[in-house]
Image (spheres, grey):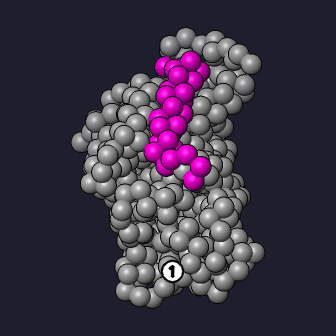
């Protein structure tokens, strides 16, 4: 079915959009998130295939995951600062084009060493895209639906875990793992085309100079929120990154069951994403401790649940609910970031990919030290507890703090 572009001029603003146009824009933003999530998590499901094809160990494939995550950590603040003066539409299109190239290079990388470089490069636009996409979604949504708007953008990531990653694993098993990154490049290009058609050019926030954003960004509440995500969320990645070999070696199932295990994280992530939006709108930052407390309990139970197929699938769904932390922290950053909205929104994803680097690294250390595949659950629980401690610090220091100017929404975007 052909979809007509929005009937708005280049100077249009959020208040001129119809609900249908808002829905189309959100779909385009979500599709971009789906492409990014599929690429980000592909190495976790394809780990056994990449070990054989590249002649390396599981922890070394974990380093490819960490290389991508480090690319996000570097690229998110850097590209957010460099793109601070760009129109949001132009920046989103450029970031998606860059992402397509990075994944095409990953598909063609001939050696393990070249893949380390290409996965790092592919990760560079990740955080900036999600940051700008979240700001765009908030700008076209009612003020009381901010958490929901952010959760819809983040839905692309959770759908990637639920659908994209299992499909990528299946595709890698029947054809070749390199085709996964090639298909991600095609989805990224499709996203750029849809946003070029549907997203008006005039949906922009107040322009901030890079130095002004850096000054506004350098505040304790901002760093505390980023710390909760970077440390607390690492627990999920510690387990998720090594799920495939855990299912093969501990649960003792056939490789065909691995996509189902990965889909369990996706089911939990989709549910958690919407729960996180609801918790954010209702409790603000207080919702974070609820998510981290749940995660601590589930991660501690993971080693006991990994022995049978039904229980490990239940564990993956339960741990995947940690995805609720994303909308909560993203929304909170918009409250405390002041004039550093773009930089803070992008850095939120840098924080979560710091978790994506720390989790596989610490989990791999525990496995290499001989503690077994299921030791990743204990490592993850320790990280979730560390996130709770950072939350307690943040809650204590922010009581009585002066409020920061709220994030502009659809109601004031026309000013």
Q: Residue at x 41, y 42 (%)?
A: 107
Residue 358: image quadrant is bottom left
- Residue 341: x percent and y percent? 42, 44
State the count of labels.
1
Is 111 placed left or right of 253 in the picture? left
Q: Is residue 350 visible?
A: yes
Q: Position of residue 98 (x, y in %)?
A: 37, 33
Label 1 Cα neighbours within 10 Å, binned few <14 / some 14-19 / many ≥20: many
The residue sitting at 44% across, 27% down in the picture is: 93
As drawn, which residue projects farthest toward the left? 211
Nearer to the camera, 171 or 146:
171
Residue range highlighted in magenta: 173-201
Point 66% across, 61% down: residue: 256
Q: Nearer the viewer, residue 10 or 160?
A: 160
Q: Is residue 187 magenta?
A: yes
**At x 64% / y 12%, what residue is drawn?**
7
Q: Secondary structure at mark 1?
A: loop
Q: Quadrant of residue 401?
A: bottom left
Find out whether residue 220 is within the magenta segment. no
The secondary structure making up most of the magenta span is: helix
- In this rendering, does residue 133 appear at all? no
- Name the foreground residue: 366 vs 137: 366
Placement of the N terminus among the 4 image quadrants: top right
Query: Residue 74's spot in the image, x, y percent?
Result: 30, 51
Residue 258: x and y, percent? 63, 63
Q: Is residue 315 above or below residue 83?
A: below
Q: Which residue is mark 1?
A: 373
Compare residues 65 and 211 and report the one nearer the observer: 65
């Amino acid at each position: 079915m052909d979809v007509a572009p929005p009937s708005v001029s280049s100077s249009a603003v959020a208040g001129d959009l119809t609900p249908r146009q808002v829905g189309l824009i959100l779909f385009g933003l979500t599709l971009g998130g789906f492409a990014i999530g599929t690429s980000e998590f592909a190495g976790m499901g394809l780990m056994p295939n990449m070990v054989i094809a590249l002649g390396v160990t599981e922890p070394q494939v974990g380093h490819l995951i960490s290389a991508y995550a480090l690319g996000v950590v570097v690229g998110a603040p850097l590209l957010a600062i460099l793109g601070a003066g760009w129109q949001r539409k132009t920046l989103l299109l450029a970031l998606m084009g860059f992402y397509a190239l990075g994944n095409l290079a990953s598909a063609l990388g001939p050696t393990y060493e070249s893949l380390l470089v290409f996965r790092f490069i592919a990760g560079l636009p990740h955080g900036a895209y999600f940051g700008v996409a979240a700001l765009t979604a908030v700008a076209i949504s009612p003020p009381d639906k901010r958490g929901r708007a952010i959760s819809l953008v983040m839905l692309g990531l959770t759908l990637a875990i639920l659908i994209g990653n299992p499909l990528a694993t299946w595709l890698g098993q029947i054809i070749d793992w390199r085709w996964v990154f090639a298909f991600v490049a095609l989805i990224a290009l499709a996203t750029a085309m849809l946003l070029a058609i549907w997203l008006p050019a005039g949906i922009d926030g107040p322009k901030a100079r890079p130095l002004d954003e850096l000054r506004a960004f350098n505040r304790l509440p901002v760093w505390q929120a980023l710390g909760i995500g970077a440390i607390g969320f690492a627990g999920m990645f510690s387990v998720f990154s090594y799920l495939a070999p855990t299912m093969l070696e501990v649960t003792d199932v056939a490789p065909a069951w691995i996509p189902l295990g990965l889909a369990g994280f996706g089911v939990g992530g989709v549910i958690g994403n919407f729960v996180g939006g609801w918790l954010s709108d209702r409790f603000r930052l207080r919702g974070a401790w609820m998510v981290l407390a749940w995660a601590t309990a589930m991660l501690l139970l993971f080693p006991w649940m990994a022995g049978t197929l039904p229980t490990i699938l239940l564990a993956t769904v339960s741990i995947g609910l940690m995805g609720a932390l994303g909308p909560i922290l993203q929304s909170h950053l918009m409250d405390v970031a002041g004039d550093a909205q773009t930089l803070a929104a992008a850095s939120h994803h840098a924080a979560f990919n710091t978790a994506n680097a720390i989790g596989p690294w610490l989990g791999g250390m525990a496995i290499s030290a001989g503690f077994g595949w299921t030791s990743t659950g204990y490592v993850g629980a320790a990280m979730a507890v560390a996130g709770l401690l950072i939350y307690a610090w943040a809650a204590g220091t922010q009581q009585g703090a002066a409020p920061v100017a709220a994030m502009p929404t659809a109601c004031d975007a026309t000013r």
